[in-house]
Amino acid sequence: MLAEEYINDRKNVNIPEQLIDAYFKSVFFIKISEIADDNFCFYADFTGRKTMVKLFLTDPSKILGEILERAWSSVFFSATFTPLKFFRYMLGGSEDDYILKIRSPFDENNLKLMITQDISMKYELRDSNIEAACGCINEIVKGRTGNYMVFFPSYSYMEKASEVYRSLYDTSNIIFQAQGMDEAEQSRITDKFNNENSVVLFTVVGGVFSEGIDLPLEKLIGAVIIGTGIPQLSFERNIIRDFFDAKFNSGYDFAYKYPGFNKILQSAGRVIRTEKDRGVVLLIDSRLCQMSYVRLFPEHWKHYKNVSKSEAIKNEISLFWEEKI
């Protein structure tokens, strides 16, 4: 390789950083290509005058399985391995591997889970249902004074919904997360949740506030999650879809549905963090009432309630907060 000869001749002295970076990226690409099989995909992306050639791992199960075979034992840690058989496969397991699902240690009655059965958030319908969604959000946050998070499917939809919400309801206690927010701003918002008791954050599913944020007890008492969490259509996800359609006839589930539902679980999981927590979660999307989704629900979600009107949400949360535990 000419770059390697050039670097060796100069004995790593006065070598342009761009050349060193390109050299090591190229070496890495070549080494990975040597193990590439049918589970990988090569593709080229042409953007303007730039061309990118990418080696994309479509199915990691074989490589991970080979690594696991060399280990005495392995631990994969996550609170949202759902559905379990999907993750067992993707992480390199086999059908012979034993699966044990342990119930949540938290009392399921401490979580009031509701799903709107009359509001669809399909892409072609979500704009027409903005006002209805805003009404549901308002019922949740006014049901009891406290801190809440509202998760939208995208920044663009959050902006549209925010405009409608401002025209209908008080927004003096609402924080609107900006796209590209830096760590200092993230910390400022987290501090508000820790130190105040009437904060409502409008944010996005799959963002920095949907996982890894720990706000126990009164620091967060509710969440509203809009949509099914399905990722945006993309070239790479469609590669995954086509691959698993051919392999298992389950391409859409592998590429979109399961990763999306995982984001829903992560967002809802912000509410109950300790055995003493109580809170409400409202899922706004009638698709989540379908059995194909209900089968994915963890055990502590089996007591969910279908609601069809803002008045029904109001009644449900009123009874919940009045209960003496």
Image: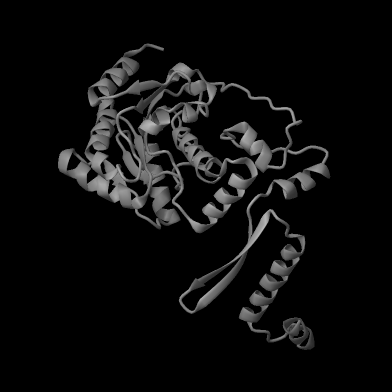
**Position of 256 compared to 200: left or right?**
right
Front residue of 28 and 244: 244
Can you say which quadrant of the picture contains the N terminus? bottom right
Q: How far from the left and from the top, in percent, is residue 324?
A: 37, 11
Whether residue 88 can be seen here:
yes
**Residue extending furthest top?**
324
141 in relation to 10, above or below: above
Pinpoint residue 265: horizontal percent, then vertical percent: 49, 34
The image quarter containing residue 202 is top left
Q: In this orientation, which residue lies closer to the viewer: 273 or 82?
A: 82
Quarter of the image holding residue 138? top left
In the rendered structure, the answer to whether residue 321 lies left or right of residue 63 reads left
Is 77 left or right of 203, judged from the image as shown?
right
Which image quarter: residue 128? top left
Front residue (pair 104, 225): 225
Residue at image point 72% right, 83% down: 3
Is residue 284 shown to the viewer in this render?
A: no
In this rendering, the count of numbered labels is 0
